[in-house]
Image (cartoon, rainbow, N blue to C red):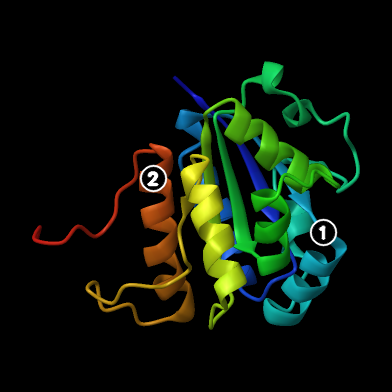
Amino acid sequence: MKHKIVVAITGASGSVYAKTLLEKLQQVSDQIEDVSIVMSKNAQTVWETEIGDTSYLQLPFHFFEKHNFNAPFASGSAKYNCMFVIPCSMGTLGRIATGVSDDLITRAADVVLKERRKLILMIRETPYNLIHIKNMETVTLAGGIICPCSPSFYSQPQTIEAAAATVIDRALDLAGINISSYRWGKQ
């Protein structure tokens, strides 16, 4: 089965994670039927600040405006099987946890949850307050996966991009996408 994937990029800090995910999705295009992206204006500003360019404009994926409810993944009938929210702001987490579908990101997340498909929220902010923790619990109980953007260091990453890749590789594993990655205990 080829994957149909939604990538939602919010305005939380951590554009390197979104960029790394999108680059890795291009590398496994043989496993992908479609990648659709919804990116908030704040996410564009943060990307341009943190990455220093507008390279997201050159990606070979389908882009949808944040309020375009005609996007195919706004309905379960389109059969998108996975959604990444990366980086996921605490505000977006809160809206998803309470079922507030006020834009395409939260509507798509609601659809993925109701269809019992994979919703992977890659939260970036720290520290957490009790509201954040309760929202993470709610999303988890609803079937979502909370995957904090916390790099591992087993593979001894030497760059920010390599450290970010440790998180993305884990998220792609969670999504069921076959990737070549550092594996603990394997040389």
Question: What amino acid is found at the position of numbered circle 1 in the picture?
Answer: Ser
Q: Position of residue 131 (x, y in %)?
A: 61, 70
- Residue 67 placement (x, y as % from top left): 91, 44
Q: Residues within 10 Å of mark 1 (few under 14, many from 20)?
A: many
Q: Does residue 14 sit above or below 72 in this rendering?
A: below
Horizontally, residue 9 falls left or right of residue 161, namely: right
Expressed as whole percent of the image width and height from the top left, the position of residue 173 reads 36, 46
Given residues 111 and 39, the one toward you in this image is 111
The reply, left or right, for residue 125 in relation to residue 41 is left
Q: How many marks?
A: 2
Compared to 126, does 24 lie above or below? above
Residue 34 appears in view: no
Q: Is residue 110 left or right of residue 169?
A: right
Residue type at tag 2: Leu
Does residue 142 sit above or below 89 in this rendering? Answer: above
Disc 1: which residue:
40
- 89 to 120, vertically: above or below: below
The picture places residue 40, in percent across and down from the top left corner, at 82, 59
Residue nearest the viewer, comparing 163 with 176 = 176
Mark 1 residue element? loop
Residue 75, image quadrant: top right
Residue that mark 2 sits on? 174
Which residue is found at the position 58% from the left and 48% from the top? 84
